[in-house]
Image (spheres, rainbow, N blue to C red):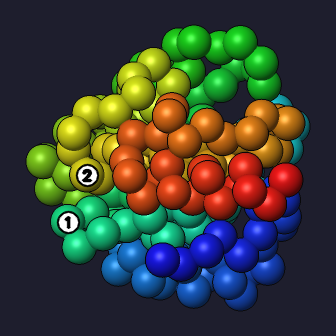
């Protein structure tokens, strides 16, 4: 099994981020990333560097049945409607609602089925433990594996997938 190269919330080099985006096969994620970063008004806890790590984590977790395009869009949308960096239990549903306004331009390469999966992942990423959908659960774990940025050690029992739980154990073993 691959190991997470770092457990610290590092800033990924821009060249690495662009390679990750290219690996997803998307046409619009790089532009969406820039747009979302430009409108972001909160601090770094849930900002662009977190989103880049969520993309990296999602691609590390992705199996053959994981839709990498959905994972990529999730990375840059899931926290887009946060009102603060602390308790904001409705940021997922607000971001899921935002998806409808992004469909025509920013998400035009996604099918309706992919949009529904993306909405499910974005809406439930803090409220649900797991869904049984490989792509949605990968999105959940990609976000949870970056909890160290908030001084929270990822808990293997709170991961949505076996692979996510293994990565969480690796993080615990290195601390």
Q: Is residue 61 left or right of residue 89?
A: left
Query: Is residue 75 visible to the viewer in this orientation of the structure?
Result: no
Q: Which of these two is toward me, 76 or 142?
A: 142
Question: Within the image, what quadrant is residue 174 found in?
Answer: bottom right
Crowd around label 1: few <14 · some 14–19 · many ≥20 (10 Å): few
Q: Is residue 70 left or right of residue 115?
A: right
Q: Which of these two is toward me, 50 or 168?
A: 168
Secondary element at image label 2: helix
Q: Which of these two is toward me, 107 or 2?
A: 2
Mark 2 → mark 1, Cα distance in angstroms: 7 Å
What percent of the width, then of the height, locates residue 74? 45, 49
Query: Is residue 121 visible to the viewer in this orientation of the structure?
Result: yes
Q: Is residue 146 left or right of residue 92?
A: right
Q: How many marks?
A: 2
User: Looking at the image, is 84 positioned above or below residue 59?
Assistant: above
Outermost residue on the front side: it is 173
Question: Within the image, what quadrant is residue 11 found in?
Answer: bottom right
| Residue 117: assigned label | none
| Residue 65: assigned label | 1
Q: Which of these two is toward me, 145 or 88?
A: 145
- Whether label 2 touches label 1, CB < 8 Å: yes
What percent of the width, then of the height, locates residue 57? 56, 62
What percent of the width, then of the height, locates residue 36? 63, 49
Q: Is residue 108 left or right of residue 145?
A: left
Residue drawn at the location 74% of the way across and 57% of the way down: 173
- For disc 2, the marked residue is 134
């Amino acid at each position: 099994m691959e190991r997470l190269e770092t457990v610290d919330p590092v800033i990924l080099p821009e060249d690495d981020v662009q390679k990750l985006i290219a690996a997803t096969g998307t046409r619009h994620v790089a532009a969406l990333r820039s747009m979302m970063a430009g409108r972001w008004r909160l601090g770094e806890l849930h900002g662009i560097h977190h989103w880049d790590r969520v993309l990296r984590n999602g691609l590390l977790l992705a199996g053959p049945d994981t839709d990498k395009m959905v994972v990529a869009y999730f990375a840059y949308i899931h926290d887009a409607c946060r009102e603060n960096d602390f308790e904001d239990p409705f940021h997922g549903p607000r971001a899921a609602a935002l998806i409808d306004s992004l469909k025509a331009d920013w998400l035009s390469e996604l099918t309706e089925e992919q949009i529904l999966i993306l909405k499910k992942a974005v809406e439930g990423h803090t409220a649900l433990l797991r869904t049984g959908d490989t792509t949605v659960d990968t999105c959940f774990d990609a976000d949870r594996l970056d909890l160290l940025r908030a001084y929270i050690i990822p808990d293997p029992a709170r991961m949505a997938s076996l692979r996510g739980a293994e990565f969480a154990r690796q993080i615990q073993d290195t601390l």
